[in-house]
């Protein structure tokens, strides 16, 4: 059973939650319910004003020179702008990340793939940026490659080592290849 309330205009009993009184037609909603769009616009404007006032406006700091007792204002220095990284460098870094994590490639192998005319065709500078900034555990990549060779190609640990360091193969460093060989099971 619904609760009954009195109409705001004619005072007749109506069901609670009814938008209009069936007797007089008076809207029973409060101001916010009657003007949802207007209230929404006002909220957006107020939030915009608050946001713009909290934005990048320099702060004024009042200082007093004690020798002359003259007040002055100075702006607080803003942080220097970060240098922008060229889009090509960012793209090369993304490719390097993919090659390193998905294909377990070596640092030299990734670099060669990035600059290859038959590969990604990045500039040597963008490829070097990618190699310098990619976060890859090269020893782990060498071990994963070694495990793949051992499992799928039945290669001996010495043959795996040779494949890992080969300039025609994976191009891992001797230290990375030795780590992989030492950790094969």
Image (cartoon, grey):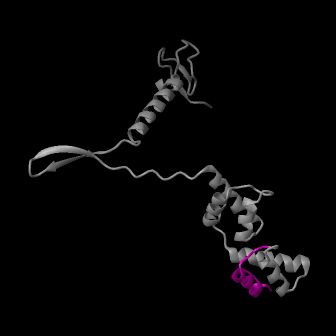
Q: How many marks?
A: 0
Q: In the rendering, at what x and y percent does residue 35 appear?
A: 51, 23
Screen quadrant of the C terminus: bottom right
Relative height, residue 60 to residue 164 (above, below): above
Relative height, residue 6 to residue 114 (above, below): above
Relative height, residue 176 to residue 60 (above, below): below
Instruction: Report if residue 163 lies within the magenta region.
Output: no
Residue 135 placement: quadrant: bottom right
Relative side of 79 to 169, left or right: left
Q: In the rendering, at what x and y percent does residue 18 appear?
A: 58, 24
Instruction: Report if residue 176 lies within the magenta region.
Output: yes
**Secondary structure mainly formed by the magenta segment:** helix
Which residue occupies 77% across, 85% down? Answer: 181
In front of the other: 104 or 36: 104
Residue 178 placement: quadrant: bottom right
Relative side of 35 to 88, left or right: left
Which residue occupies 77% across, 79% down? Answer: 165
Q: In the rendering, at what x and y percent does residue 12 appear?
A: 51, 17
Residue 58 placement: quadrant: top left
Q: In the rendering, at what x and y percent does residue 160 appear?
A: 83, 82
Which residue occupies 70% across, 55% down? Answer: 122
In front of the other: 55 or 46: 55
Range shown magenta? 170-185
Screen quadrant of the N terminus: top right
In front of the other: 39 or 151: 151
């Amino acid at each position: 059973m619904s609760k009954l309330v009195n109409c705001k205009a004619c005072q007749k009993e109506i069901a609670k939650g009814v938008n209009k009184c069936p007797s007089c037609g008076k809207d029973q909603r409060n101001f916010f319910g009657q003007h949802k769009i207007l209230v929404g616009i006002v909220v957006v404007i107020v939030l915009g004003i608050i946001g713009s006032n909290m934005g990048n406006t320099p702060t004024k700091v009042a200082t007093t020179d004690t020798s002359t007792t003259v007040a002055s204002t100075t702006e607080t220095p803003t942080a220097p702008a970060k240098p922008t990284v060229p889009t090509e460098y960012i793209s090369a870094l993304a490719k390097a990340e993919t090659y390193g994590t998905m294909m377990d490639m070596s640092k030299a192998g990734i670099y060669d793939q990035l600059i290859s005319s038959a590969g990604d065709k990045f500039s040597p500078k963008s490829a070097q940026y990618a190699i310098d900034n990619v976060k890859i555990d090269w020893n782990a990549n060498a071990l994963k490659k070694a495990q793949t060779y051992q499992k799928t190609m039945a290669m001996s640990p010495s043959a795996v080592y040779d494949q890992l360091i080969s300039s025609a193969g994976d191009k891992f460093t001797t230290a990375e290849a030795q780590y992989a060989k030492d950790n094969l099971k």
